[in-house]
Amino acid sequence: MATNTAAGGASNLLRFWPWVVIPLLALILPQIFDSRHGITLLSHMGIAIIFALSYNMLLGNTGLLSFGHAVYYGLGAYVAMHVLRMVNDAGGEGLPLELIPVVGAAAGLFFGVIFGSFSVRRAGVVFAMITLGLGALVHSSSLMFSDFFGGEAGLFGDRTYAPSLFGVDYGSNTNTYYLVVAWALIAAISIYLLRKTPLGWMANAVRDNPERAQFVGYNPTIVRFIQFALSAMFAGLAGGLFVITDEIVNDESVGQIQSGIVLLGSYIGGIGYFVGPMVGAALVTVLESSLSSYTEAWVLYFGLLFISIVMFAPMGLVGIVHTQYLTWKAGGWKGNTGIRLYMVLAGLVGIFGAICVIEMSYHYFRSWDPSAPFALMGFTVNATNALPWLISFGIAVIGFGLMLFHGKPMLARRISGSSEGGKA
């Protein structure tokens, strides 16, 4: 019995390790990426994590696919910016900067109650289309009502002209980042605890079988409405933090691209896992910021990554890691670790060749002078010559071919053999 108790305690500790490791990592990262750009990128990652967690309250927990979640992120940001501007106009007197995100959260909740009152009456495709229409409506309004939205230029504010509860100088990007981390931790804990409440369990029940949830006495529409409003509240919180970090908000904050990015991040990370949207949001933020400076085809790579996840790994990146961990723990890797590594390496070779083809295609069809040499993977190539194309296609075909037609059958035979041996 003592052994079982110790094992249960160790299991509980392993379950909560992210709540210790992730905050510690967040505190250390500014010491590693200490440039202005690096710290701003880290702040954007924290904001994206809150936004993605709020979105997963709809998609992952309640089964509501929204194409307009940026509405609450952006409107929360706009209201928070107006409050910040009021504080600036008052000479730095008024609401402390640390509480500005609360204004964004309140605005998100307010608009979530209004729009959710009619949009959650239907689920599935109808709900998705309603959110798409609301997103288009709010985005077009942001260009029409310039007194509130500031037109195409948007609205500006200055966080340094706002008081601080703790006397912190937020002229420093590092201090601003730590404020984002504090709110991200509060939001993550709150959303996690909400999942463990009766509301969270009923949201899962409504997602899986709304008729049965109604049969046991719960109104699916009310459950969806409460989840929708709370999700909008946390999205508005993320918008308020964005205002503090960037000191500007414009129509892009309520646009369809912003809604698409949070959908991509949540699904790529894994909507079935609490940390999935966090991982996906951080990854998408880094790729969006860094990949665009290396290649013009970064949007295409986003699309290919999303399609690959949807087709081959709908559980997301975290789901892949978790599944492989369970397989390894159950002894499924025994005797076939080499084959698995072989398949990974072959796949990477194929991806390398595919990237070369894509980059040459972009240069050939989008460059003013396709015959001009350009740098590709450390080499200078000419896209009008046949040899680079043949080599790139050859690498892609060989890599994917070895993975699909050689490694996969070997792995299947080895797993099948191990299963038969275990039964014997």
Image (cartoon, rainbow, N blue to C red):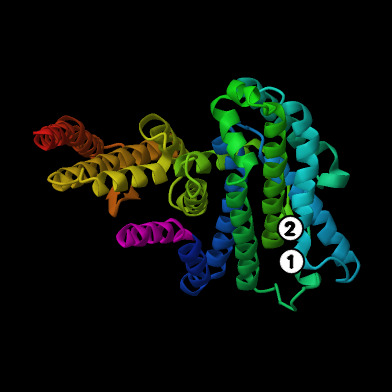
Q: Which residues are magenta?
A: 1-18
Helix, strand, or loop for circle 2? helix
Helix, strand, or loop for circle 1? helix
Q: Is residue 166 above or below residue 117?
A: below
Q: Which of these two is toward me, 344 or 349?
A: 344
Amino acid identity at mark 2 = Pro
Task: Please state the horizontal and vertical placement of residue 417, each as a whole percent of the image.
Answer: 10, 34
Q: Is residue 258 visible?
A: no
Task: Please state the horizontal and vertical placement of residue 15, each as a whole percent of the image.
Answer: 43, 56
**Residue in the picture at 49% in, 75% down:** 31
- Which residue was labeled with disc 2? 101
Q: Is residue 390 left or right of residue 134?
A: left
- Which residue was labeled with disc 1? 98
Amino acid identity at mark 1 = Glu
Q: Which of these two is toward me, 283 or 397?
A: 283
Q: Which of these two is toward me, 261 or 194?
A: 194
Asked which quadrant contains residue 197, the reply is: top right
- Mark 1–mark 2 Cα distance, whole angstroms, equals 7 Å
Disc 1, disc 2: CB below 8 Å?
yes
Our reading of the magenta stretch's main secondary structure is helix
Asked which quadrant contains residue 14, the reply is: bottom left
Q: Residues within 10 Å of mark 1 (few under 14, many from 20)?
A: many
Q: Is residue 187 left or right of residue 150?
A: left
Asked which quadrant contains residue 166, the reply is: bottom right
Kindly identify which numbered label has been placed on residue 138: none
Which corner quadrant holds the C terminus? top left
